[in-house]
Image: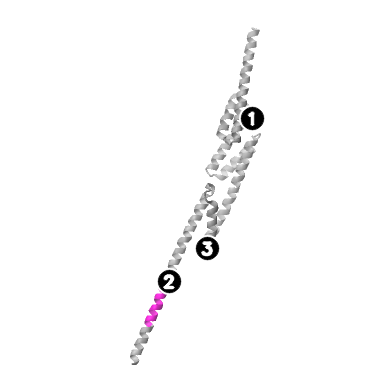
Amino acid sequence: MRKLLTVIGLTFLMLAGCSNGDFDKAMDEGKTALTNKEYKNALSSFERALDEKKDDSDATVLVEQTKVMIEAVKLKEETKVEESIKSFEKVENMKNGNNTLIKQAKEERTALVAILEQKKKYEEQLVKSEELISKKNYTEAKEILNKLVSETKDNKNLEEYNKKALGLITKIGEEEKTAKSVTTAAKAQKNDAVTSQKVATEKNQKAETEKNQ
């Protein structure tokens, strides 16, 4: 009986040792994946670790923190900047959170805040350009808009501003073309009027000469 109990005890110890080994391995793999920003792989590893130790607080926090990070990255890819910033803040502020995730979330949030500031700047430039266009100050408006287009080119987060600027540049071109046509027509009309007046004057002079003769 004593021998049987000893065997059972050793079996449990071996199983516990295997469980701890699997847990540690899963946690290490997850943390390595975090370092490489492979968040979905990290989540799978942490969930596997949690299966080994259901009540482990570290694994529980890592699962939740990584889930929020995945959501934040998804929102960023969808260019939902403000929502993404809030999610990254959650990652940063999570109690007993992983330092690697906290650092990465802070870097992402800081970059997105800078994008918001850029958006505000470009919005102001678009408003100013529209005011200049309404005053027919096309040269200054084009300078602002061409610079804006150059700075926002190939930036998905600023795509809407790039399109708006290009639209205003097209509008300027159309208005300049129309203004030029109107000027040309007015000039032609003026020339015709001068020519007609000249012809009428010459005709009157000729008639007066013939009358005097």
Disc 1 marks a residue whose amino acid type is: Asp
Residue 126, x across and y down, in percent: 54, 56
What type of secondary structure mainly makes up the magenta span?
Answer: helix
The answer for how far apart the CA atoms under marks 2 and 1 are is 81 Å
- Pick the quarter of the image with the C terminus: bottom left
**Magenta span includes 171:** no
Foreground disc of the pair 2, 3: 3
Q: Earlier in the sequence, mark 2 or mark 3?
A: 3
Q: Pointer 1: what residue?
A: 58
Give the quarter of the image for residue 71.
Answer: top right
Residue at position x 62%, y 17% in the image = 14
The answer for how far apart the CA atoms under marks 2 and 3 are is 23 Å
Residue at position x 39%, y 75% in the image = 192
Q: Is residue 75 depicted above or below 129 in this figure?
A: above
Does residue 66 appear in this view? yes
Query: Quick one: SS at disc 2?
Result: helix
Q: Are marks 2 and 1 in contact (CB under 8 Å)?
A: no
Q: Earlier in the sequence, mark 3 or mark 1?
A: 1
Near mark 3 (Cα within 10 A), the count class, few <14, some 14-19 or many ≥20, is few
Disc 3 marks a residue whose amino acid type is: Thr
Query: Quick one: SS at disc 3?
Result: helix
Residue 149, x across and y down, in percent: 52, 54
Image mark for residue 186: 2
Q: Pointer 3: what residue?
A: 139
Does residue 54 appear in this view? no
What range of the chain is rendered magenta?
185-200
Q: Is residue 153 depicted above or below 3 in this figure?
A: below
